[in-house]
Image: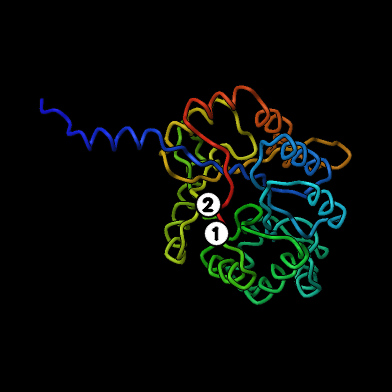
Amino acid sequence: MDAIPYFTQLTIQMTKRLPINLIVNADDYAYFPAVSRGILDAAKAGKLSATGIIANKPNLTTQLEQLDTLQNIDLGVHLNLTSGEPCTEQMRMLLDKNQGLFPSAYRMSLMILNQKISIQHIRQEWHAQIEACGGRRLVFLNSHEHIHMLPILFPLILQLANDFNIPFVRLTKADWLLPMSGTALVRNILMQGMASINQWHITRPMPIFLGLGSSGKLTIQYLDKLFATLKPGQTYELMCHPGYFAADEIIHPQLIAYHHWEQELALLQSAELQNLYDKFGIFLGRYHH
């Protein structure tokens, strides 16, 4: 067997030494006060890179003031069309049959695709949600339940990012790690199709999205498998949902079944996760802006 040329060996060694830059991004800040408290604690412990703000939730002003006490964390807006009360009166009037509240992601998607909710109304609502976080340096946009990935909405979120000088937009991607349920397979097929369409609208590099396969229920076993697929020198964004559970705040059975907030909070602060970072050469990073 021919010897590997010296410069090829050097390139391989340098590549192996390149770190993996991981942005650990907590969704759902301001979703519930208990969730916000967990995100704040994870951030204070240095275990988060970023968090996305749900700006149409009650007591937003107080919760934004709590965020302002943090340093070394990137902020963005977790744009919302599927939970709570809209920020704009126009959207509330359109949703009068649902008591002026946002419907489920499935129902909202149908309303958008059937043109019962116009893109202009969504633009006004999302514009108001971004403005509600005003005065802070916002560096990314994404959305609650990934509704911005609808190809009819993705150009809108990019336009809003440009209007507000926000450099990064999440391109949610499928997660093909096994084992996979039938529901996860269908979700991945849909998400992969939307990502394939939407990526053509992106004109600058974005962090590679991670975490869909275990959304709301991250485990050390899942992350071990996931991190083994990462490439040195790349920047990734890990979606997570840390928080505390409060029975008097969080009463919806589906939310409780979907989210393991305290488990994820403990995981982010665990020695086991730090061991995985060391094992795979992962460093917690931030959005480069």
Q: Which residue is mark 2?
A: 172
Q: Describe residue 84's horizontal placement relative to residue 242 as left or right.
A: right
| Residue 16 position (above or below residue 185) | above
Q: Describe residue 181's horizontal placement relative to residue 64 as left or right.
A: left
Residue that appears at 61% across and 62% down:
109
User: Residue 138 placed where, x, y %?
Assistant: 67, 60
| Residue 218 position (above or below residue 200) | above
Q: Earlier in the sequence, mark 1 or mark 2?
A: 1
Query: What amino acid is at disc 2?
Result: Thr
User: Residue 268 placed where, x, y %?
Assistant: 65, 32
Nearer the observer, 276 or 32: 276
Query: What amino acid is at disc 1?
Result: Met
Q: Which residue is mark 1?
A: 149
Q: CA distance from mark 1 to mark 2?
A: 7 Å
- Disc 2 is placed on an element classified as loop
* Discs 1, 2 touching: Cβ within 8 Å: yes
Quarter of the image for residue 164 reads bottom right
Quarter of the image for residue 170 reads bottom right
User: Residue 251 placed where, x, y %?
Assistant: 82, 41
Q: Describe residue 100's horizontal placement relative to residue 71 as left or right.
A: right
Residue that appears at 71% across and 48% down:
28
Q: Quadrant of the C terminus?
A: bottom right
Residue that appears at 73% across and 54% down:
53
